[in-house]
């Protein structure tokens, strides 16, 4: 029974032109447009350098790591330089900010950077991330130097080789500098952000498959469902086999999107492709569960349910930064709970985590969040399905 | 009946009023899918599907998709999906709505075959002529209430009229209608278009008397015939003639 229903559910899904369009064709079409539109923006964006100011106080001038890092990131001879930095007084910095000549300025006080912005946006986010990285680096460098000196003294060597320690510390600082460059423009690529949300959207469109699969088995939703209901079959088996067929169809759609973006659009997903695929697979499961939930809980026609499903997906993607990364920043800042329960946001956040964090903690946190979301959606759907009885079909 | 009363469910076949098939599956696949919900043995199922296809006369359309079928063929596919597993009790809900006469004939023949093969058939319809052709026992329902039960002959006896005479008359003055009403046993006289319809409560030679009257008054007519009341008359008699929602 399970295999019989699974086989035919798969056939009906793969032959359904509307579903094939939304699951297979639409993400590919959208991806093509993203590639055309955003690669041009990106090319022009490369010329845009973030204008910032640093308050040229005594503490800043005494801190080699701060000075050197900003010097490197603002080096006019470097094509990929991130900042155009003005070293000014506090009053001057404030005036530049008011006049809109800079996106923000930094004051180094008691070894901590205080950032001042007039508005929020991607440039401000980059500036903030860079300063955070420098704080971490300077802590690491001082700890390292301290450890090296302690080690030498514990070994009874009071003739410390300061030159060696200096070289080691310099090496660490260089690595950190490379990392700072790495979080800069090349990895905050608009195209990549769009592709992440595109994958998130594709995963969530799996919900339409889940919804259609469930509708075909509900007596109050489709005439085919009436037939299934009067047959001597377990509703659980029918629903599970239909969901599995929907999930496999969804994975095929996702695989096609990856193949197309990698081989045709030449999108570079980096070295973490298996983890990206895992995230896509878990995200698709969450999407499918969301479709099952909408299909089961809402008492509406299939067309309305499909409309709601598409709207919810698009809204989720919008809030997670599909139409502009600033939105994700705004939501994170003002209503962070939305991004915590928005599966599109969990998926995109999982992707960012792969790039911006050395450890996979945040990535797996997002994977776990998606799995929990899916389990809750499935549990609610199960309860609703168990309760459904029909007076008249 | 509980949802998991599988031993009862497997003996039941339902043909819904709405066509309940998958647009994405061919004729054969649709029947195979729904039959497969009842019959697990593949070999047996194949035989059952072939029998169902033959019963509804869809042999030439096995690989056709539903959208390639006419309304009549689609109805036949709908029936095949509901009865392929050879149930012993079959519910058919208006299976001939909006089909061409040939398909209707085929469907009614198929239903008779199912009955002859031993299935009990519960047939819901508004077409009384179909009831007269295929039903052994009839229940007239109105607003969920049983109004009458019995064979077709038994039900016809419930009608208050005994005979209906239909006359094709090109022109008929009002005064003649009034006079016809006064003839013996006449219940009702109507004149619509060029059809004069006279219904009688009882009596045996009503037709001859009416012909005599028409001759006497020199009223020219094209056709005249008499008939017994139909189930349609009984139905209207029992449920009333006012329009329904």
Image (cartoon, rainbow, N blue to C red):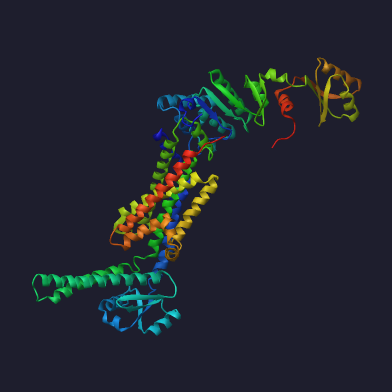
Residue at horizontal 64 percent and vertical 22 percent from the top? B138
Horizontal and vertical percent position of residue A246? 42, 43
Horizontal and vertical percent position of residue A44? 41, 70
Left or right: B184 in relation to A98: right
Q: Foreground: A345 or B233?
A: A345
Q: Foreground: B112 or B71?
A: B112
Which residue of the protein is positioned furthest toward the left in this rendering?
A156
Horizontal and vertical percent position of residue A357? 30, 62
Q: In which quarter of the image is residue B100?
A: top right
Horizontal and vertical percent position of residue A307? 52, 51
Q: Is residue A230 visible?
A: yes
Q: In which quarter of the image is residue B191?
A: top right
Residue B27 sits above or below residue A84 on the image: above
Residue A352 sits above or below residue B163 on the image: below
Report the number of discs. 0
Left or right: A137 in relation to B210: left
Residue at horizontal 38 percent and vertical 61 percent from the top? A192
Left or right: B212 in relation to A362: right
Residue at horizontal 89 percent and vertical 30 percent from the top? B174
Q: Is residue A266 visible?
A: no
Residue B136 sits above or below residue A283 on the image: above
Quarter of the rendering occupied by the N terminus of chain A: top left
Quarter of the rendering occupied by the C terminus of chain A: top right
Q: Quadrant of residue B140?
A: top right
């Amino acid at each position: 029974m399970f295999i019989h229903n699974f086989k035919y559910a798969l056939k009906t899904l793969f032959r359904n032109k509307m579903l094939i369009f939304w699951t297979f064709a639409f993400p590919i079409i959208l991806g093509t447009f993203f590639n055309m539109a955003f690669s041009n923006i990106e090319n022009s964006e490369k010329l845009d350098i973030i204008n910032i100011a640093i308050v040229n106080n005594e503490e800043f001038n005494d801190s080699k790591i701060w000075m050197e890092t900003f010097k490197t990131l603002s080096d006019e001879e470097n094509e990929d330089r991130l900042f155009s930095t003005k070293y000014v007084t506090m009053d001057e910095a404030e005036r530049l900010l008011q006049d809109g000549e800079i996106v923000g300025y930094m004051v180094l006080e008691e070894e901590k950077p205080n950032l001042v912005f007039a508005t929020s946006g991607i440039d401000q986010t980059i500036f903030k991330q860079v300063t955070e990285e420098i704080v971490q680096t300077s802590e690491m460098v001082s700890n390292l130097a301290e450890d090296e000196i302690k080690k030498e003294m514990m070994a009874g060597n009071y003739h410390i080789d300061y030159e060696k320690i200096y070289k080691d510390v310099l090496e660490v600082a260089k690595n950190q500098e490379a990392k700072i460059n790495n979080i800069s423009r090349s990895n905050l690529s608009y195209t990549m952000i769009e592709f992440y949300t595109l994958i998130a959207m594709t995963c969530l469109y799996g919900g339409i498959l889940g919804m259609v699969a469930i509708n075909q088995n509900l007596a109050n939703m489709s005439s085919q469902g009436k037939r299934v209901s009067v047959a001597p079959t377990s509703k659980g088996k029918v629903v599970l086999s239909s969901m599995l067929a929907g999930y496999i169809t969804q994975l095929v759609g996702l695989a096609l999107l990856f193949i197309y973006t990698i081989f045709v659009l030449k999108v570079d997903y980096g070295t973490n492709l298996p983890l990206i695929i895992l995230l896509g697979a878990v995200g698709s499961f969450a999407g499918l569960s969301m479709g099952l939930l909408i299909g089961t809980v809402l008492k509406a026609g299939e067309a309305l349910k499909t409309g709601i499903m598409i709207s919810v997906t698009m809204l989720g993607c919008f809030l997670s930064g599909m139409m502009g990364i600033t939105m994700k920043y705004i939501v994170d800042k003002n209503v962070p709970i939305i991004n915590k329960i928005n599966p599109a946001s969990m998926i995109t956040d999982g992707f960012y985590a792969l790039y911006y964090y050395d450890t996979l903690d945040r990535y797996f946190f997002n994977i776990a969040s998606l799995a929990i979301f899916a389990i809750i959606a499935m549990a609610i759907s199960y309860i609703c399905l168990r309760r459904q009885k029909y007076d008249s079909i | 009946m509980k949802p998991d009363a599988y031993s009862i469910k497997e003996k039941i076949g339902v043909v819904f009023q709405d066509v309940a098939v998958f647009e994405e599956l061919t004729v054969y696949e649709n029947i195979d899918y729904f039959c497969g919900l009842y019959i697990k043995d593949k070999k047996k199922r194949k035989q059952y599907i072939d029998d169902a296809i033959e019963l509804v006369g869809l042999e030439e359309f096995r690989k056709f998709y539903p959208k390639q079928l006419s309304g009549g063929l689609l109805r036949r596919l709908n029936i095949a999906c509901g009865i392929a597993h050879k149930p012993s009790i079959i519910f058919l809900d208006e299976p001939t709505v909006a089909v061409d006469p040939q398909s209707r004939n085929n469907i009614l023949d198929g239903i008779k075959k199912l009955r002859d093969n031993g299935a009990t058939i519960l047939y819901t319809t508004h077409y009384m002529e179909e009831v007269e052709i295929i039903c052994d026992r009839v229940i007239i329902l109105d607003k969920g209430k049983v109004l009458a039960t019995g064979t077709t002959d038994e039900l016809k006896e419930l009608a208050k009229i005994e005979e209906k005479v239909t006359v094709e008359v090109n022109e008929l003055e009002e005064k003649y209608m009034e006079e016809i009403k006064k003839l013996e046993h006449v219940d009702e006289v109507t004149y619509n278009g060029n059809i004069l319809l006279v219904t009688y409560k009882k009596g045996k030679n009503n037709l001859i008397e009416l012909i005599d009257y028409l001759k006497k008054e020199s009223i020219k007519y094209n056709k005249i015939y008499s008939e017994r009341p139909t189930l349609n008359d009984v139905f209207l008699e029992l449920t009333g003639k006012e329009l329904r929602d």
